[in-house]
Image (cartoon, rainbow, N blue to C red):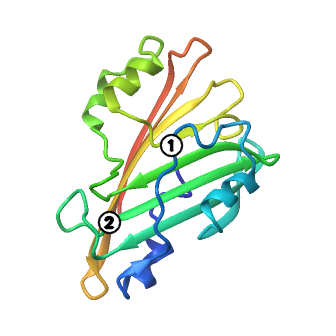
Amino acid sequence: MFKALRMLFPVFFFSLLTGCAGTDFVRPSSETFKLGQTTYSQVVQQMGEPKKSGVVLKNGKNVISITYVYSTTVGEPLEEGVIPVRAMSYYFHDNRLVGQEFLSSFKSDNSNFDETKVATISKGKTTRAEVIQLLGRPSANYIPPMVTETSGEAIGYIYQTTRGGAFSGFKVFQKALMITFDDKNRVLNIDYSSASTK
């Protein structure tokens, strides 16, 4: 699900050699861009030209994706030894926002979450409000076609770390959680994954 943000390492790898990659930005508030309403041009007007763009296929529909990435070797990371990265991706279908994803390993606005709490979430029982109370502000939000038409809105949590250097090699770790809800705002599906490069 999180293909645009998953393993962002190749996006900024060569720029990291000079100590900085991309243009710094502040994560917009949850009220800034509205799923199903905000247009592509409205996002670009506020965020500027994206670092990366493309087209992805989601549930049989072509979706335009744009990504903003910032990293620096001199920023303060959440975890010692991590190169801090901040990234934001937006997805559009028929010129309307259908998904947004954020991740950060900067201490100031990190998107880390406690994956050990996922086991306490129950399908058909736990509500959206209870999930947010348990895990905090979501890192991602989606509506169809980013999720199937039979699902309601989905939320996600994403965290990524990059360690190492040009000579020793880079090691990237990411964990991602997506939770979809039914029409009563109860958990319909839970999708957790983690991955790392050697």
Q: Nearer the viewer, residue 3 or 110?
A: 110
Q: Is residue 5 left or right of residue 168?
A: right
Residue indicated by mark 1: 29
Point 67% across, 66% down: residue:
53
Q: Nearer the viewer, residue 119 or 23?
A: 23
Q: Secondary structure at mark 1?
A: loop
Q: Is residue 26 visible to the viewer in this orientation of the structure? A: yes
Point 61% across, 69% down: residue:
52
Point 50% across, 15% down: residue:
186
Instruction: Estimate the spatial distance between the alpha carbons at disc 2 and disc 1, rounded to whole Å.
Output: 21 Å
Q: Position of residue 45 (x, y in %)?
A: 69, 59
Q: Secondary structure at mark 2?
A: loop
Q: Position of residue 137 (x, y in %)?
A: 40, 35
Q: Nearer the viewer, residue 34 or 158?
A: 34
Residue indicated by mark 2: 84
- The answer to whether residue 129 is above or below residue 96 is above
Q: Depth-wise, is mark 2 or mark 1 nearer the camera? A: 1
Q: Residues within 10 Å of mark 2 (few under 14, many from 20)?
A: many
Count the numbered circles shown: 2
Q: Label 1 is placed on what type of residue?
A: Ser
- Which image quadrant: the C terminus? bottom left
Which sits earlier in the primary sequence, circle 2 or circle 1?
1
Q: Is residue 141 left or right of residue 137?
A: right
Q: Position of residue 152 (x, y in %)?
A: 63, 24
Point 35% across, 33% down: residue:
136
Q: Label 2 is placed on what type of residue?
A: Pro
